[in-house]
Amino acid sequence: MARFLFVVPPLVGHVNPAVGVAAGLAARGHEVAWAGHEELLWQLAGPDALVFSCGLPAGAGERPAGLKGPAALRYLWEGFLVPLADAMAPGVAAAIEAFAPHVVVADQQALAGGLLAEARGLPWVTSATTSAELVDPLSGMPKVAEWVESLLDGLRTRIAGGRGTADPRFSPHGVLAFTTRELLGPAAVPPQVRLVGPALGARPSTTDFPWEWLDPAVPTVLVSLGTANTEAGAGFLAAAAEAFARLDARAVLADPGGVLAAVPPNVLVRPRVPQLALLSRVAAVLCHAGHNTVCEALWHGLPLVVAPIRDDQPIVAAQVVTAGAGIRLRFARPDADRIAEAVGKVLREPSYRRAAEAVGESFRAAGGSAAAAGQLEQLALESLARPRP
C-alpha cells in the first residue's frame, strides 16, 4: 500500500478529475490525502477526505473584467498562479511532512506541489486538467517564455530553497493529461505526457434537481458557463435564455450568480446542477469551452455549442470544432438568433453527434481514472523499491 498526496488549486474544474483518480487509487487499497482549500475539497472529495489546509492569496478569484491577450496572461501568472503558490507552500510542506507520501500528484496550476516535491526528492506527477499547456502556447513568444521562467525561478528560491530545476507544470516523472488524440489533435506533446482521457468518478451530489421537469419527448440542452464566470456571463446567459424561446427544445440553465430574471417557460434556471447525472439525460451542451465540461459532454456523446471566454477556452473550442463535434460562437457579442441557429443545427444534424460519440469512444478506450491510477501505482511501486535518502 502506498500513500499519494494530491495538491490542487481552489478550482472545481481542477479538483474533479483528481477526485476520480484518487477514488481509483483508494479502490486499489492505497492511502490518499489532499493539500488545498479544505471546504472545496470536503465538498468535492467527500467529508471523510484527509485534507491538509492551504492558504489562499488575498483577493483570490477576484479577476479584473475584460482582460485579454497579454494582460490576461500577466494576470494569470502575477495575479493568480504565483501568489497561489506562495500562499499554498506552507500547507503543502506541512502535508508532505505529516503524511509522508510516496508520490505527489500536483495540478499544473498548483505550482507549489511540484516545486516542493522535487526539492524533497519525492517522485511527483503533474495533473494537466486542460490540454492548453500541452500544445506549448508560448512556443512563438520566447520573451514571454523567459518571463514565465523567471517567475518560476523566483518561486523556487522563495519556497523551495532554490533546490530543483524542473518546470513544475511538466514533471519528468510523468504528466497525466485528461484527453485523447481524437480531441487534442496531432500537435506534438512532451514525451512524458500520458493521454489517459477524462477521469470521471462518482461525484457527491451537492444539489437537488427536479428531474420530473425533463420531458423525454423534447430534447433538452444543458447551458453552463462554469463556476468562475458569473459576472462576465450575464449577457450571454440572458441571450441564451431568449434563444430557447425560438427553439422546439428545453434548456437547463446554470445560473450560480442569480443574474437572470424572467425566462421562457421552456427554460429551467438553477443555481447549481448535478452535471454528470444530467448529461446522461440531455441532447446537447452549450458552454464556455471549459475543458472539463467539454470532456464530460463528449464522454456522453453530446454535441456542443461553445463560446470561449478566456485562458485555455479558445484552444479547447478550436479542438471541438476541428473534431467536428460542435459549433463555435463569439462570447463577447451574444446574439439570441445566432445561439438559436447553432443549437438547432447541432440538434438536427447527426454529424455533430457522430463526431462527439467518436471522441467519447476514444475517452473510454484510454482508460480515464483507472489508467491514471495505474500509472501512479507503478511510480509508487518503483519508489518503494528504492532506498529512501
Image: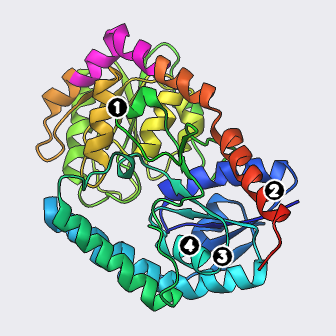
The residue at which mark 3 appears reads as 121
| SS for dot 1 | loop
User: Which sits earlier in the primary sequence, circle 2 or circle 4?
Assistant: 4
Give the distance between the C-alpha atoms of the residues marked 3 and 1, in whole angstroms: 59 Å
The residue at which mark 1 appears reads as 265
* Image vertical order of residue 218 relative to residue 221, above or below: above
Residue 62 visible? The answer is no
Percent from the top left, x then y, of residue 159?
49, 88
The residue at which mark 2 appears reads as 381
Would you say 232 lies left or right of 135 here? Answer: left
Give the distance between the C-alpha atoms of the residues marked 2 and 4, in whole angstroms: 20 Å
Would you say 284 lies left or right of 263 here? Answer: right
User: Which sits earlier in the primary sequence, circle 3 or circle 2?
Assistant: 3
Question: Which of the pair 245/275 is nearer the observer?
Answer: 275
| SS for dot 2 | helix
Identified at 62% across, 25% down, the residue is: 365
Q: Which mark is residue 113?
A: 4
Q: What's under tag 2, amino acid-wise?
A: Leu
Would you say 290 lies left or right of 379 here? Answer: left
Place residue 127 in its image quadrant. bottom right
Instruction: State which region is magenta.
Output: 342-357
Percent from the top left, x then y, of residue 236?
22, 45
3 and 1 marks in contact (CB < 8 Å): no
Percent from the top left, x then y, of residue 46?
71, 61
Q: What's under tag 3, amino acid-wise?
A: Gly
| SS for dot 4 | helix
